[in-house]
Image (spheres, helix red, strand yellow):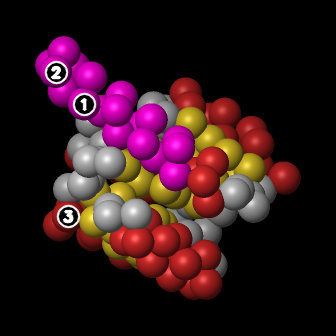
Amino acid sequence: MDRFKVIVIDDEVDFVDTMVKRLKDKGLESYGAMNGPDGLELVESKDPDVVVLDVKMPKMSGIEVLREIKKKKPLTEVIMLTGHGSVEAGIQGLQLGAYNYVMKPVPFNELLNLIVQAYDRKLIEQERGV
């Protein structure tokens, strides 16, 4: 697997810690943030290939964070994490340029496969000069 950068932005500390650790175990450069503003700072400083982003967070919603990411780093692929009550937000995320959305809880291997697919799409977009 190529070594690429992933940022996980979610207000659930255990989820972020576990995901970052497991992604690092798979050889990926990964970072975590517990809220939107901190996540955007990480996106700015680390220039990730893929962001895994929770829709519902305090301070700043995932939709707001997605808008900012796409404004500043349009080639960064974003996977939205939604709960049962926020499927509409996942669909809205797709309309705003997210790569995909998944329902929480999501099995790690399923999310990892989506992350790799999102990274592959980023590479294709870069080659095409999109």
Q: Residue at x 56, y 36 (%)?
A: 100
Q: Position of residue 16 (x, y in %)?
A: 53, 76
Marker disc for residue 127: 2
State the image quarter where residue 109 is shown: bottom right
Given this view, does label 3 or label 1 mark the residue nearer the observer? 1
Q: Is residue 110 visible?
A: yes
Disc 1 residue type?
A: Leu
Q: Earlier in the sequence, mark 2 or mark 3?
A: 3
Q: Residue at x 32, y 48 (%)?
A: 1
Circle 2 residues within 10 Å: few <14, some 14–19, many ≥20: few
Residue occupying the point 75% across, 61% down:
105
Q: Amino acid at mark 2?
A: Glu
Mark 2–mark 1 contact, CB under 8 Å?
yes
Q: Are marks 3 and 1 in contact (CB under 8 Å)?
A: no
**Residue reaching furthest to the top:** 128
Task: First in sequence, mark 3 or 1: give its number.
Answer: 3
Real-space Cα distance between discs 2 and 3?
A: 21 Å
Q: Residue at x 41, y 54 (%)?
A: 51
The amino acid type, in three-letter code, at marker 3 is Lys
Which numbered dot is residue 123? Answer: 1
- The residue range painted magenta reads 112-130
